[in-house]
Structure formats: structure tokens, C-alpha cells
Image (cartoon, rainbow, N blue to C red):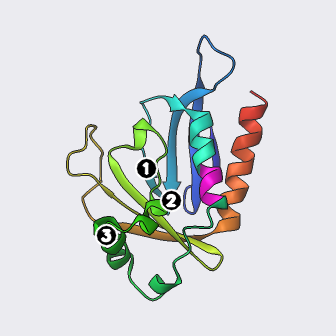
């Protein structure tokens, strides 16, 4: 199932049967600007994935207006190589199937800038993926729409 638009933001997922009814597990990929993040064939907790999306939406510590006029590459390099604790809020960890990617985000005004690259020591193989830094800006409300629909599906599954 796909929620949203792969060209903007989308969640592709399927539920996996488990022995527990308390938590939902499944395969999932996050699409940003028609690029897939995550290894779809490695099931994770969909509840934890959903929680991380909610945290991103509500995170007030990720606003960095000082990066407004910087390129995605420059922002990624600045926040990933800097040991300042204030940049801890830019980490985006969606679960084990996303561990092959270094994913960060910042907020500026009403947008989220996603920044990511494939880790050089990645475990899984990815077609058409390289080690370049990728960036994509999207309105927070677009993320929220997709997350809320995902949340509703999980709640009713």
C-alpha cells in the first residue's frame, strides 16, 4: 500500500503477521522526491516508524534559520560533522531498515529540509543509489497529512 505521492512524500508499506496484536510490524519505505529510503524487505515496527514521523512534525528544536541560504550539501556537512549537541535534534532514525542511510532534517519556517546519503558501510544493496548527498524541502503540512493517514490505517488494522 502507498500513502501519499512518491514525487513529493509517500510511505509504501505492508503489514506482516505477528504473534502480537499490540504492535504492528511490516515492510516500509519512505519516498522523498521520487527517491526511496530504507530497505523494504527488512520488516520493522511500524508503530516506531510512525512515532518518529510524529516527532519530526512536532520537533521545535530542529529550527535553524541560519541555514536558510545554504545548499543541501553544505547544511548536511555542517550538521553531520559538528559535535554540538544542538544538532542532535536533526537525526532522523526510522528503524533498522533505514540504518544504511545517514538521514538528517532541519526546519526553516513552515518547511522541513531532508538531507541524506547512503552510508559507505551499508549492509544492503540499492539499485541506482550512490554516496552523494541528497536534499529535499517539503511543507510540514504535507508530511503531517501522510503521517495522519498512516496513523489511521495502523489504528484500524
Tell me the element at label 2. strand
Q: Percent from the top left, x then y, of residue 131?
A: 24, 59
State which tag comes first along the sequence, 3 or 1.
1
- The answer to whether the residue labelled 1 contacts the one labelled 2, judged by CB atoms less than 8 Å apart, is yes
Crowding at mark 3 (Cα within 10 Å: few <14, some 14-19, many 20+): few
CA separation in Å, label 2 and label 3: 25 Å
Q: Percent from the top left, x then y, of residue 66?
A: 47, 85
From the viewer's perspective, is residue 71 above or below residue 154? below
Q: Is residue 115 left or right of residue 13?
A: left
Q: To which quarter of the image does residue 134 belong?
A: bottom left
- The segment highlighted magenta reads 53-57
Tell me the element at label 1. strand
Indicate which disc residue 37 carries.
1
Task: Out of 70 and 130, give the one closest to the viewer.
Answer: 70
Residue 68 highlighted magenta (yes or no): no
**In what quadrant of the picture does the N terminus appear?**
top right
**Dot 2 corresponds to which residue?**
32
Amino acid at each position: 500500500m502507498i500513502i501519499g505521492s512518491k514525487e513529493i512524500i509517500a510511505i509504501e508499506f505492508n503489514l506482516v503477521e505477528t504473534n502480537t496484536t499490540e504492535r504492528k510490524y511490516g515492510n516500509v519505505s519512505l519516498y522523498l522526491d521520487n527517491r526511496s529510503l530504507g530497505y523494504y524487505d527488512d520488516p520493522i515496527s511500524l508503530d516506531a516508524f510512525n512515532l518518529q514521523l510524529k516527532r519530526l512534525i512536532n520537533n521545535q528544536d530542529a529550527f535553524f534559520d541560519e541555514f536558510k541560504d545554504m545548499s543541501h550539501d553544505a547544511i548536511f556537512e555542517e550538521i553531520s560533522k559538528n559535535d554540538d549537541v544542538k544538532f542532535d535534534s536533526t537525526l532522523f532514525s526510522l528503524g533498522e531498515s533505514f540504518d544504511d542511510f545517514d538521514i538528517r532534517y532541519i526546519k526553516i519556517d513552515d518547511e522541513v529540509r531532508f538531507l541524506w546519503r547512503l552510508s559507505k558501510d551499508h549492509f544492503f544493496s540499492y539499485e541506482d543509489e550512490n554516496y552523494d548527498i541528497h536534499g529535499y524541502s517539503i511543507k510540514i503540512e504535507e508530511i503531517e497529512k501522510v503521517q495522519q493517514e498512516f496513523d489511521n490505517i495502523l489504528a484500524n488494522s
